[in-house]
Image (tube, rainbow, N blue to C red):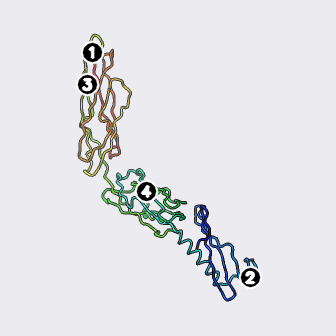
């Protein structure tokens, strides 16, 4: 039974009687560090306080070892994972995905301490950090799950793998954390036009009337399961190109997004021909496509 308790350890007293007399000792479980430690201390033999010159009978040594197992099991932690499984969607060959956190809680009794390791069943399934230590009862930590899709192909999707979460002292170790990896094929950027032209008449006072906007169709001509995450940026910094909308977004395979281009020449802009390039980019088979925007002021 426990005989004393401090903040981070608990002492238990044991007694075994032999023909020669009673042996008594204290077994301490200490959780003040990152690992549970146990100690046999304050040993009293039938001849008094234990000294180096007093031999310990085998049955007493065995009883001491069993007392350690008993107190460690009393303070055993338990692994609780949230969520209990993951499905991660990645693009074929893209590289390491954004991390998804998995929470680990020590679901053991007050006084337990959980330290554990996370290992993967497949090289493309990554966990970081791989070691978590020092979780007291009801405390939580986390590791991030990500997928390296560099060598994964959509035709073999889905991939099944798992992480093993284990702690040597936990009552429910190891825990298996399944991960399903869905691999999307690459998208393909397709613009219906490669150039837009705006023709504007100059005025005597230098002011320009509102210029009607123009649109072009931006498509993802990849397989239906693909998704194009696109962005549109200007390669120059002209002031007369007032806006592009939407400048970023997602387009499913086979779908089309109308893109509106708006120009607004500043007052006093001289007659002439001006150009700007819009670059549509995103992870895809062709990486980018340029749209040439021309402004003619006559």
Q: Percent x, y for residue 214?
A: 24, 29
Lower sequence index among marks 1 and 4: 4
Q: Residue furthest right?
A: 53
Lower sequence index among marks 3 and 2: 2
Q: CA–CA distance between discs 3 and 4?
A: 53 Å
Q: Which residue is mark 2?
A: 47
| 144 sits left or right of 188 in the view | right
For mark 4, give the secondary structure.
strand
Nearest the viewer among 189 and 205 is 205
Q: Quadrant of residue 242?
A: top left
Q: Percent x, y for residue 268?
A: 33, 14
Q: Percent x, y for residue 67?
A: 59, 76
Q: Percent x, y for residue 91?
A: 35, 51
For mark 1, give the secondary structure.
loop
The 10 Å Cα crowd at callout 1, few under 14, some 14 to 19, many 20 or more, is many
Nearest the viewer among 58 and 13 is 13
- Mark nearest the camera among 3 and 4 is 4
Q: CA–CA distance between discs 1 and 4?
A: 62 Å
Q: Which residue is mark 3?
A: 198
- Mark nearest the camera among 1 and 2 is 2
Label ID, residue 202: 1
**Quadrant of image for the C terminus:** top left
Q: Quadrant of residue 292?
A: top left
x 32%, y 49%: residue = 186
Label ID, residue 102: 4
The 10 Å Cα crowd at callout 2, few under 14, some 14 to 19, many 20 or more, is few
x 47%, y 60%: residue = 105
Q: CA–CA distance between discs 3 and 2?
A: 106 Å
**Quadrant of image for the N terminus:** bottom right
x 39%, y 54%: residue = 149
């Amino acid at each position: 039974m426990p005989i004393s308790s401090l903040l981070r350890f608990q002492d238990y007293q044991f007694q075994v009687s032999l023909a020669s007399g009673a042996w008594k000792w204290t077994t301490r479980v200490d959780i003040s560090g990152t690992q549970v430690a146990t100690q046999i201390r304050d040993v009293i033999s039938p001849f008094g306080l234990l000294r180096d010159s007093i031999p310990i009978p085998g049955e007493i040594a065995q009883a001491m070892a069993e007392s350690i197992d008993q107190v460690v099991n009393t303070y055993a932690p338990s692994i609780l994972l949230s969520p209990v499984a993951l499905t991660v969607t990645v693009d074929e060959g893209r590289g390491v995905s954004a991390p998804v956190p998995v929470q680990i809680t020590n679901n053991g009794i007050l006084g337990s301490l959980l330290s554990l390791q996370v290992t993967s069943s497949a090289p493309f399934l990554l966990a970081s950090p791989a070691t978590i230590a020092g979780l007291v009862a009801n405390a939580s930590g986390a590791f991030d799950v990500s997928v390296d899709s560099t060598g994964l192909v959509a035709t073999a999707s889905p991939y099944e793998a798992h992480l093993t979460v284990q702690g040597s002292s936990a009552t429910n170790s190891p825990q298996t954390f399944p991960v399903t990896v869905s691999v999307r094929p690459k998208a393909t950027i397709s613009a219906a036009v490669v150039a837009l032209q705006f023709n504007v008449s100059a005025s005597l006072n230098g002011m320009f009337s509102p210029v009607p906007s123009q649109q072009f169709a931006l498509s993802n001509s990849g397989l239906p399961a693909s998704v194009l995450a696109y962005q549109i940026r200007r390669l120059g910094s002209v002031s007369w190109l007032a806006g592009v909308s939407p400048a970023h977004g997602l387009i499913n395979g086979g779908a089309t997004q109308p893109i509106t281009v708006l120009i607004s020449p500043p007052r006093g802009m001289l007659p002439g021909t001006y150009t700007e390039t819009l670059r549509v980019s995103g992870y895809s088979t062709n990486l980018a496509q340029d749209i040439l925007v021309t402004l003619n002021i006559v």
